[in-house]
Image (tube, rainbow, N blue to C red):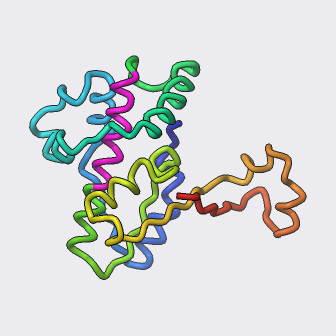
Amino acid sequence: MAFSLGILRPYFAVCQRKSTTCPRLKYTLRSNEKSSRQGLESLTAEEKKHIPPISEIRTDNAAYRQLLLEVYQEHQKAEQGNSTAFERFVQAQVLWDETWAEKIAQFVKANPDYQVVVLGGKGHIIYGYGIPSRVERRLGVGNVKVRSVLLIPVKILLCRQIDPLLTLFGITRNSTILLESNN
């Protein structure tokens, strides 16, 4: 499910205060929405300049497709999203993953001494299917160390009846918990 980019403002503010490099994608949400409605073939030459070559956009990971099918069905039930066809939904998701992976790989190649931190949604990092596996494909498995961390608001965890555990660790309702995924 989509979220407001406003929740990332504190992270960007820290980057600015620390004079940390924070490259932005020239790829726009509009291109992603367009591809979800009309397919990758609908993108103009100008839009294609900001994404990896179409031949590098891989949608063949069966496990990822299954995960995306479940997400797609949730979106359809909730009447969310721009895509009425599952294949276009997959293309839009993977286009986002591949574009981020391409940008990350380019940055790492140009700045090998940097540590890169990417803030991405759960669907783009969970199980390493989205962005992480695509970065490794570009840089070579073993040539890059990828770790994924899921940020889960405490209010979601509180709904799962673990309030006493949170209290034990001194975590309040306004805290954010970092959980490393098993990929």
Up the image or down, 87 lies above or below 121; here it is: above
Give the dominant element type of the magenta stretch: helix, strand or loop. helix
Q: State the residue lying farthest toward the right.
A: 164
Q: For the point 9% across and 37% down, which residue is it?
A: 45
The segment highlighted magenta reads 86-101
150 vs 63, left or right, is right
11 vs 177, left or right, is left
85 vs 71, left or right, is left
Up the image or down, 167 lies above or below 65; here it is: below
Who is closer to the viewer here, 88 or 14?
88
Counting from the top left corner in percent of width and height, residue 50 is at: 19, 47
Numbered circles on residues, count: 0
User: Residue 126 magenta-drawn?
Assistant: no
Counting from the top left corner in percent of width and height, residue 180 is at: 60, 62
Q: State the residue lying farthest toward the bottom.
A: 113
Counting from the top left corner in percent of width and height, residue 145 is at: 41, 71
